[in-house]
């Protein structure tokens, strides 16, 4: 029985041609074997791990070539990627790995329930287990890509606001403004080396609430933003006092 699990390494056929009959017979036997354990336990974990590694590899290749967007569009889930997004996917290996990993993680949950537990995959269906699974990945990919796209948009908005702070008068809404004076804050802001701290301070000076800053910068919590701003204000105040004593 372990031999059946060890041989789970078929190759996905993106052209959509019917899978080899022998392969589907092997998959049918394998599903029966996994069903005895209720699709859980060590043997299922081995099967799922192999499926995940295969799915990540295929998705990375599809993203690199842009083929994933053709497959998504054929299912009526068109994402219409911008040229900049295609270039980023083609050149950024870490991004492809992240999107592939998140897509596969979500697809595995649905695949187990719908394809295996509920019997959605059948020998008569004409697709191998891996082809069926990659189809599930294609349906999950748009959700992960939209999350990435939204994150990039928030990041660009934060950078834009940061740039506007340098070009426009400083907003009087920040507590730091009251302590240090607007012109001094403007000068200090330009000297902050850490991009994340600079963006956080810039957004605060521009009147954004801590919750809005947390969302824009994808921070862990509002308290994290409050702590960052507090530490920055205290440091700036100490620096000013040190200059006065000197």
Image: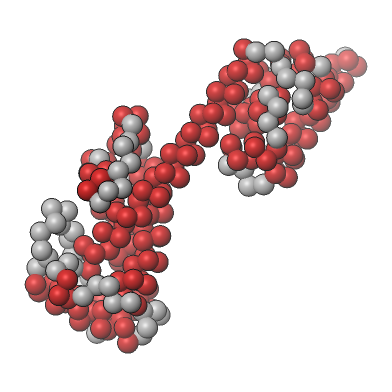
Vertical position of residue 80 compared to residue 68: above or below: above
The quarter of the image holding the N terminus is bottom left
Q: Residue at x 9, y 74 (%)?
A: 22
Residue furthest front in the image = 76
Give the x, y percent position of residue 68. Answer: 26, 46
Give the x, y percent position of residue 25. Answer: 14, 77
Give the x, y percent position of residue 42. Answer: 38, 78
Residue 93 or 26: which is nearer the viewer?
26
Give the x, y percent position of residue 214. Answer: 64, 40
Q: Residue at x 81, y 16 (%)?
A: 181
Left or right of 41? Residue 5 is: left
Q: Is residue 235 visible?
A: no
Left or right of 166? Residue 235 is: right
Residue 11 or 68: which is nearer the viewer?
68
Residue 13 or 142: which is nearer the viewer?
142
Q: What colour scheme has been applied to the protein in the rendered image?
A: secondary structure
Q: Residue at x 18, y 59 (%)?
A: 12
Vertical position of residue 156 compared to residue 246: above or below: below
Residue 211 or 129: which is nearer the viewer?
211
Vertical position of residue 196 compared to residue 15: above or below: above
Res 17 → quadrant:
bottom left
Q: Is residue 58 visible?
A: yes
Left or right of 123? Residue 31 is: right
The quarter of the image holding the C terminus is top right
């Amino acid at each position: 029985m372990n031999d059946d699990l060890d041989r789970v390494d078929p190759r996905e056929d993106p052209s959509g041609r019917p899978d080899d009959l022998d392969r589907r017979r092997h998959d049918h036997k394998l599903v029966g074997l996994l069903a005895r354990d209720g699709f859980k336990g060590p043997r299922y974990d081995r099967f799922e791990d192999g499926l995940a590694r295969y799915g990540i590899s295929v998705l990375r290749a599809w993203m690199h070539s842009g083929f994933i967007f053709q497959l998504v569009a054929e299912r009526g889930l068109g994402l219409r990627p911008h040229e900049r997004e295609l270039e980023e996917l083609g050149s950024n290996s870490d991004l492809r790995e992240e999107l592939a990993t998140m897509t596969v993680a979500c697809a595995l949950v649905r695949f187990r329930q719908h394809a295996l537990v509920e019997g959605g995959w059948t020998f008569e269906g004409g697709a191998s287990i891996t082809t069926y699974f990659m189809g599930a990945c294609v349906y999950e990919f748009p959700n992960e890509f939209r999350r990435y796209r939204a994150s990039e948009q928030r990041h660009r908005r934060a950078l834009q606001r940061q740039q506007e702070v340098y070009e426009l008068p400083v907003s009087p809404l920040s507590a730091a403004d009251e302590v240090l004076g607007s012109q001094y804050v403007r000068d200090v802001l330009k000297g902050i080396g850490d991009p994340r701290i600079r963006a956080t301070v810039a957004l605060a000076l521009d009147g954004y609430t801590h919750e809005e800053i947390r969302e824009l910068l994808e921070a862990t919590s509002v308290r994290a933003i409050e702590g960052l701003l507090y530490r920055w204000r205290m440091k700036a105040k100490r620096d000013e006092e040190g200059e006065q004593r000197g």
